[in-house]
Structures are given as structure tokens and as C-alpha cells.
Amino acid sequence: MAVATPTRAPEVRRSGIDSRYRRGVGRWLVLAAAVVVGLMILAPFGIMLLNAVKSPQDYSANGPLSLPSSIYLDGVLAFWERTEFPVKLWNSVFISAVVAVLGALLSLLNAYAIGIGRVKGRLWIVTLFLLANMLPQEALIYPLFTMAQSVGLSNSQWSVIIIFTVIQSAFGTYLLASVLGTFPPALLEAAALDGASRWRILWQVVFPIMRPTLSVLMIFFFIWTWNEFFIPLVMLTTNDTQTIPIALASLQGDRMMDAPTINAGTLVSLVPAVVFFLIFQRTLTRGVTAGAVK
Amino acid sequence: MADSTSILTARRSRAGRRPRAPRRGRAAWVGYLPYLLPGAVAFAVVIGYPLLSNVYFSLFKWRGGMAPLRWNGLGNYADLLGDDQFWTSFGNSLAMIVAMVLVPTIVGLLLAAVLFDYLGRRFGERVSSVLRATYYLPQILPVAVAGVLWNWILNSQTGALNEILRGMGIDAPPNWLGDPATALPAVMLVLIWIQIGYPVVIFMAALQRVDPELYEAAELDGAGWWHRFRAITVPQIRPETFVVTLTCTVAALKVFAPIYVLTRGGPESSTLVPSYYSYLNFFDKSQVGYGAAIATVLTLVIVVLAVIILGLQGRAERREREGI
């Protein structure tokens, strides 16, 4: 990986900040280096785009770098049909969305007790949750796999939903507990003087103020769950329950898959993630800053 | 846990200040215990019990499912000590740490500083934020999808890279993922590609909270870019560096999807990692007890490392507070 070698900053002139930044050729070299790094990162995407709309004949005749001689969408179609893409898309959306909501809810309840209730031993509880989030999933998978079988949840999206709700909320609890630890006490006192119960304080005082942070948390939970591979790979064994990454990975071994179809499959599989990211990018930054400078 | 730290770090600086909640009697906190109940139950069922069961399984020879469990004591662990593949897999974890922690953190630190403190000022924030988004792009893809893409690029017969090399007149380009000599470096390259944007984004967010007057003052004193980088940038974002190091090290030890999609640990175990090795024993070789022992060792390594890094972080923070 090329590193942008920083050249020395131009000599400092006392005459003014703006003009001194406009001097020297060094800055163009640094910019060029940074752009080269960017192009190296973009290159695989570019090659993939080029070949996703190429026919297999075109690919074998002209190689991966040529422009497609004509736009060929059969690769996309082949992938779409062979993986029953709409089913996988729905599975991914359903699992990730339910985990996002349930995970945020569970995090909030935990964090309310820890951050505002200041229950005894909270430092240990938070550490426990943090460590739980770091555990390798391999250390849980076989027992979870047999447990799912014994309660009739094998090959069910709900087994994956339950598992990720807990794993994600382990992180959510850690995060929200430290945010709620700094919750303005005046608000809580005022509500308590008005005779509000803990339950009402949670929903009518704490929840509205935490809403931006909670929505950021939900977006993270959604993306993380969407990208998960190991647990869905083990738990979801048939075509009708699998998520997009699993479908793509299991098609990869298929000998019928030619290069353009693989590329088309990759393209179709990454589109939802990119679209989701573009939609929520602003919410994300806003939520993070809203939480940070509240 | 890729992007978690952006919120995590935003919070860190405030964690120390904790205004008191209203006092109502000596043990007001007891009233909050019911709120912890759903979390505690879910945690016990999904994490606590399976974790302990896994340790329990690791003490048996077991082919899984309905097969009988045969007590083996610490036999599985003893076998691990003499198992070359086990040692190879942990050796490869070091390579994963180089590819996912060392290189991305160092390069990311430089890139973030260059974007923020150099290009951002000379070409405007637009330029630096477009570059930052470009670096971050691989991070938003499902890792498995990125792996499939690279698996094709690196394919010896039909892959883009070798097609290009052949076009350049190289008749026998390397079989990147199929040759034990090149497979590990090739996997490392893919991991660097995936990982590089993460520290850039975190570090740039961290730099936003550094007082710009520090830079102004240093510059007026005649400090060059490299000098400011070492004297201001690096020390100021040390907390974020800790968080990035911790999360990426844990991720490197746990890495599974890229290995599964790119090489399945091969060829000749050259890219085998602990998580894939335990998966192999669980679901391929039906050696559940042995797989459980590998997973248990991996868990211990991760927890010990996490505790060490968190301890170091705590110490650095204390020293900073006392120093100032």
C-alpha cells in the first residue's frame, strides 16, 4: 500500500495564513499520492463494474480491462434467478431490521438500570457486556446450534435474530450506559417530584432525549447484522432462509458461474449496502454529533 | 465490530464525569433491577450458557448430535499442543494482526493527518472528505461480498489480475490463492484493502476535536508538517488509537469470512486461522470436542489481550491526568 509521503510544509510567512498555504508544488505531489491511494482502493470496484455487464464471450475474447462491447444483463439475470434474490433480500432486510429494533430496546433497558439507576456492581456488568461483544462466535456456535435444534428454531431466521439481538445489545448497553451516566439530573429530579414512576421517566423523559443516539445505534446494528457471515452460515441451511452474503458465497463454488455472473452477483449484492449507507450517511453524522455535544 | 468506535470515541472523553442521579433512600438502585432482567436472561441464554457449554464440550470426545460424549479430560488441549495445524493457525493470526491492525493503523494515521492537516487546508474540506469516503468504501460492503470479488480478481485462470499480467506478456503469472507461498500475502493484501478506511475515518473524527490553535502556534514557531504530526497529532489522538488497536486486534483474531470465501484455510494450511480451524472441526470433521477446545483457547487469547489493552489504556489515561 502506497503511503502518501508528506513533504515539508512551506516556510511559514507571517504575512497571512491563506497565502502561505497556496505556495509550493509539494502540495500537488501530496494530493497526487492521496489520489493514487484512492484509485487503488477503487480499482477492484471499477474492474467489477466493467465485467458485470459483459458477456462471457466478450470476457474471454477481450479480457477484464476492455470496455464491454455491448451491455449484457444476462449475468445479472442469471444471478437474480439462481439465488432467488428477492427472497434473500427480504431475509437480510427482515433479520437486520428486527435486530436493530430489538437490540436498541434491550440496550436502552439495560443502560437505564446501569446509567441512571446506578445499580450496584455496574462497572462489572458493563465490563461483562463489553467482553461478551468481543467473544469469538465460534465459542458459542455449537451450543447455540444444538439449542436451536432442540427448541425447533433450526434453520429459522428467528434463531439468528435472537442471537444478534443479544450480541449487538451487549455493545449498545456499553455505549448507552456511559451516555446515560451523564444524563442531566435536573430533568430526572423534576420528573420524580412530579410523581412520575421509573417506567414513565424512562419513556417520557429519557427516551425522547436519547432518540438521536438510539437511531444511530439502530443503523449500526442494522449494518453489522446485514454484514454478518459466520452465524447465518451455520444456522440458515436452506435457500429460503439465507441472507445475501451467504447466497453469494455459496454460489461461488458453483462451476457454472462464469466471471461475468460472479461480477454481476457481487454488484447486485453490494448495491443494497451502498444504498443504505448513502441514505443514512447524514443521519449517522448528525446522530453522532448530536450525542457528543448534547 | 467495524464502525463501532466512531460513537464509542465520541463518548469516551465524557465518561469520567458522572452527575449523580436523584437520591431516594439508600438503596434506590434496587428499584431499577427489573429493567436489567430481560437483558440478564437473554445474556445468560445466548452468551453465558453457550460459552460454558462450549468449555464443557471441550472436555469430551464427541462426534456431535446424538453421538455419545466420551470423557477426555484435558486430552483435547494436550492434543492441541502437538497439533501443527493449531500452531500454524495461531501463527497466521499474527499475519492477520499485521494486515488488519499494524499496517492499517500506521497508514491510516498518516492518511488521516495528511487529509486533515495538509490537503484539507490547501485544497478545501471537499477534497479531503471525498478522499476519505473513497478510502472507506470497502468497509461498507459485507466482508463475504468483498471476499468473493477478490477471489475472482485473484483467480489464477479467469481472474482479472492474471489476465492483466498475461496481457503484459507474463506467460505464467502466479497462482495467487492456490500457491502456499503467495496465498497468505494475497489474503493479507485483501484484508488491508478492506480495513484501511476504518482508522482513517476514526482518526479524522478525532482530529476534529483537537484545538486548531495548537497547530497554529506550532506552525508560527516554525514546526514543519512532520514535526507537528509527531508532537501534536499522534499524542492528541492516542485514546482513539487505543480503541482502534483494540477493536482491530480482536477482529483480526476472529477473522473468518474472508478466509472462508478466499481460501478455506488452504493451500496446505498456509492461510488457516483459529476460527476457521474450529469451524472445520465442528462441522466438517465432526470433532466437536476438539473444535470446542480450539474455540476456548481463542476466547482466552482474545479476553487476555483485551484486558491488557484496556489496562494499558487506563494507565495512559491516568498518567495523562496526573501529568497535566
Image (cartoon, rainbow, N blue to C red):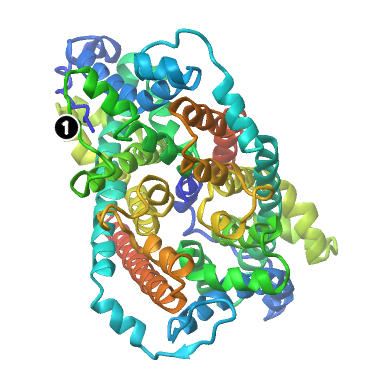
The answer to whether any part of residue A211 appears in the image is yes
Q: In which quarter of the image is the C terminus of chain A?
A: top right
Percent position (x, y) of residue A273?
A: 56, 34
Compared with residue B51, is residue A72 higher up or lower down, i.e. above or below? Answer: above
Compared with residue B119, is residue A211 higher up or lower down, i.e. above or below? Answer: below
Say left or right for B11 vs A32.
right
The answer to whether any part of residue A282 appears in the image is no
Q: How many residues crowd mark 1 within 10 Å: few (<14), some (14–19), many (20+)?
A: some
- Residue at 36% from the left image edge and 49% from the top image edge: B244
Q: What residue type is labelled 1?
A: Trp
Q: Mark 1 lies on which chain?
A: B
In this rendering, the count of numbered labels is 1
Percent position (x, y) of residue A128?
A: 51, 71
Label 1 sits on a secondary structure element that is helix
Q: Which of A111 and B46 is in front in this view?
A: B46
Q: Mark 1 points at which residue?
A: B226
